[in-house]
């Protein structure tokens, strides 16, 4: 499969009066052409910072991409000048943010925003831009698009506004779409419609998608592969099947156990405790204080990535062959 994005050892820091926050700590992942990768985890785990780093939207100062490469079609985005990056943003890579109201300009009509967005990046006539805007509004399911192009954002419902934001992101036909919590601000029925819209868009345009979310329901519907983040690191990656049916990291298992399920019996099991302070993250596994299986080594040394299959990797000492021997020995002695 052709890789469209390849991120290696990405580190992002924020320097504040209180010290340096290590928000992203050595993240590596890739995205294949035409697939959807979901990056999941609790608030503050570094998933949005990772997507902003890909778009080079980390405010500097206080933020900084302190290490790593972000290869987009072979080009390292982390090294590009701001001018070159501006030519990529919105054209080759687009982003959808969680609140559709703040993503649209309240003082301009929808038509103006779509047409201006296209004309800024492509050499097209007014008539061609208008035709493309109508095509995009049709694609995202806005009824009577010719009339609605003349209206302002406040004249649309929340779900319709998110459809318009998606049309704005797609108008230049990007190859990569980053959707940061795209359904969080919407109610459940509208969420379902927007998720179906994403599937339709991917079928029609073939765009590759990075989906940033804490909502495992959204992941189950849309993702091909999943990367689970915790305390600035990716701690498990796999296909949707690997993560939902064979999770191996105790944190991933905890996340799945804390989601309400129709077929579940008994109480939900929350993950006790809180993530570590990223001003001074631990040298070892950051999940140690919350992990029911923590061993002495966990607190001291971060585990290597264990490859469980071609698609499935996990960073946990429980996968180390020595830990497995230790468990076997202990059980045999009892
Ligand atoms: Fe738990 Fe240790 Fe695995 Fe971390 S490395 S998840 S503390 S068993």
Image: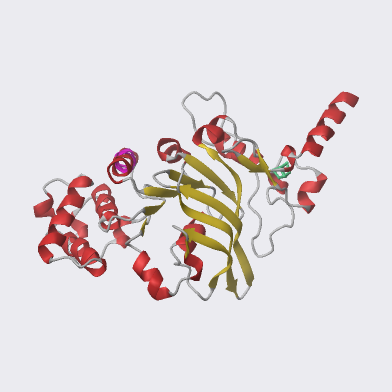
- Rendering quadrant holding ligand 1: top right
Rendered residue at 27%/50% (across/down): 158
Q: Is residue 196 above or below residue 163?
A: above
At x 45% / y 39%, what residue is drawn?
224
156 to 198, vertically: above or below: below
Q: Specify whether 101 is left or right of 3.
A: left
Residue 88, percent from left and from top = 37, 65
Out of 79 and 271, give the one closest to the viewer: 79
Quadrant (top left/top right/bottom left/bottom right) for the C terminus: top right
Tell me residue 41's x, y (percent): 54, 48
Q: Main secondary structure of the magenta part?
A: helix
Left-right relation of 78 to 189? right
Residues shaded magenta: 190-198
Residue 282, horizontal then vertical, whole percent:
72, 57
Using the rendered image of the protein, determine whether residue 271 is visible from the camera's viewpoint: no
139 and 70: which is toward the camera: 70
- Whether residue 199 sits left or right of residue 134 in the image: it is right
List x then y, in percent, for residue 289. 72, 48
């Amino acid at each position: 499969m052709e890789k469209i994005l390849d991120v290696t050892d990405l580190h992002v820091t924020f320097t504040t009066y209180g010290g340096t926050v290590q928000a992203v700590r050595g993240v590596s992942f890739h995205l294949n052409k035409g697939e959807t990768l979901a990056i999941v985890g609790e608030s503050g785990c570094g998933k949005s910072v990772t997507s902003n780093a890909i778009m080079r939207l980390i405010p500097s100062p206080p933020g900084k991409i302190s290490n790593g490469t972000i290869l987009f079609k072979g080009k390292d985005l982390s090294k590009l000048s701001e001018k070159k990056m501006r030519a990529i943003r919105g054209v080759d890579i687009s982003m959808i943010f969680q609140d559709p109201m703040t993503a649209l300009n309240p003082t301009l009509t929808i038509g103006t925003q779509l047409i201006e967005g296209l004309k800024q990046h492509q050499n097209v006539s007014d008539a061609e831009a208008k035709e493309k805007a109508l095509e995009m509004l049709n694609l995202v399911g806005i009824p009577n698009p010719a009339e609605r192009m003349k209206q302002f954002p406040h004249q649309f419902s929340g779900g319709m506004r998110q459809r318009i934001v998606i049309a704005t992101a797609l108008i230049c036909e990007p190859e990569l779409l980053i959707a940061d919590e795209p359904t969080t601000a919407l109610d459940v029925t509208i969420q379902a419609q927007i998720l179906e819209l994403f599937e339709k868009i991917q079928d029609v345009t073939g765009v590759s998608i990075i989906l940033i979310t804490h909502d495992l329901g959204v992941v189950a519907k849309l993702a091909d592969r999943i990367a689970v983040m915790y305390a600035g690191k990716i701690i498990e990656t796999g296909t949707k099947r690997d993560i939902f049916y064979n999770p191996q990291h105790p944190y991933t298992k905890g996340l799945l156990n804390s989601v309400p399920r129709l077929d579940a019996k008994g109480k939900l099991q929350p993950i006790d405790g809180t993530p570590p302070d990223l001003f001074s993250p631990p040298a070892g596994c950051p999940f140690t204080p919350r992990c029911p299986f923590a061993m002495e080594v966990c607190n001291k040394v971060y585990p290597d990535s264990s490859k469980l299959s071609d698609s499935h990797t996990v960073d946990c000492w429980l996968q180390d062959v020595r830990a497995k021997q230790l468990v076997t020995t202990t059980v045999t002695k009892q």
